[in-house]
Image (cartoon, rainbow, N blue to C red):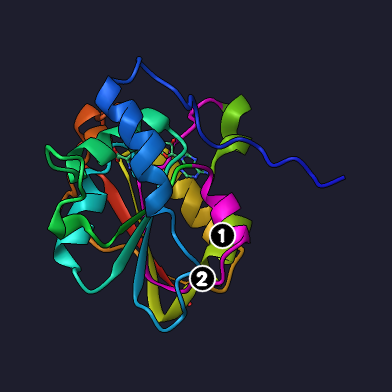
Amino acid sequence: MEKQEIRTFGRRHGKKLSTRQQWLLDNLLPTLLPKNESESELNILEIGFGAGEHLRELAENNPNRIVIGAEPFINGVASLLSAITDETNSVRPEYKNIRIFADDVRDFLRNSDSKFEQIWILHPDPWPKAKHEKRRLLHAEFIKNLSNHLTGNGEIIIGTDHWEYYDWIIEELKKTNLKVQTPDLPTIETRYQHKNKAGTTHPKYLVIKN
Ligand SMILES: C[S@@+](CC[C@H](N)C(=O)[O-])C[C@H]1O[C@@H](n2cnc3c(N)ncnc32)[C@H](O)[C@@H]1O
């Protein structure tokens, strides 16, 4: 039997969806599944996009890239679908390059040989209680696996306002041969960043390369 993976995310469903959102999930989402985009294409991946503000920004700023988002929280996926469509429920032109995997990114990566120029992870769930630490996504083994999905110059960009998790990730990275930078980036605004649950003054960022 295959080893059961530890669940790294919280709830999958939140408040009841609107009729429009449910329609978009049933009818539009299946048309936006990532295909096994060929290696020659220039792709960007965002893991745990929440409500998708940053994913939309990536799509707008990179019209020649396919931008794939993975997120198991269905209300977040529904918010993104609402935001990228017009009143006829068609995808707006600036968001035609978005693809969505509405589930655990590890299931997506297991079945994909796609390479990415950028892999973004903003505010990964910090699981602050010691008994939940094993649920943290960004342990060494996972990051090493992610690095196999980078193009030659590709980079993984991580941002978190939870400074203890940040330090923990840096310790995990010492178990790998990956190159790590800790740049002082301007704050990237997302819904979770605005909540500032960690109560820190700013998010910290990491850039990882092969
Ligand atoms: C704290 S929220 C941050 C959301 C968003 N990036 C933001 O900054 O507003 C973390 C998100 O990561 C998602 N997540 C956790 N584990 C995941 C996994 N294995 N694959 C994809 N997404 C995951 C959760 O569902 C959640 O929406």
- Mark 2 is on which residue type? His
Choose the circle earlier in sequence order: 2 or 1.
1
Mark 2 CB near ligand 1 (8 Å cut): no
Q: Residue 109 carries which label?
A: 1
Label 1: state its secondary structure. helix
Query: From where the camera sits, is residue 140 visible?
Result: no
Mark 2–mark 1 Cα distance, whole angstroms, equals 8 Å
Residue occupying the far top of the picture: 16
Closest to the camera, between mark 2 and mark 1, is 1
* Of 152 and 84, the residue lying toward us: 84
- Hey, which quadrant is residue 102 in on the image? top left
Instruction: Give the quarter of the figure containing the N terminus.
Output: top right
90 sits to left or right of 6: left
What amino acid is at disc 1? Answer: Leu
Give the vertical position of 180 relative to 23 (above or below). below
> Residue 111 in the image: x percent, y percent?
61, 61
Residue 78 seen from this side: yes
Q: Name the residue under label 2.
A: 149
Give how far across and how far down residue 175 sits, in percent.
61, 63
Along the viewing direction, whichever of 176 and 27 lies nearer the viewer:
27
Image side of residue 128 versus residue 24, left or right:
right
Q: Vertical placement of 118 versus 108: above or below?
A: below
- Residue nearer the viewer, 203 or 147: 147
Q: What residue range appears in magenta?
A: 103-129
Left or right: 48, with 80 as reference point: right
- Asked whether, in this view, residue 51 is left or right of residue 125, the answer is left
The residue drawn where x is 44% and y is 79% is 151
Q: Residue at x 18, y 69 (%)?
A: 63
Q: Residues within 10 Å of mark 2 (few under 14, many from 20)?
A: many
From this view, report whether residue 48 is shown above or below residue 149: above
Q: Quadrant of ligand 1?
A: top left
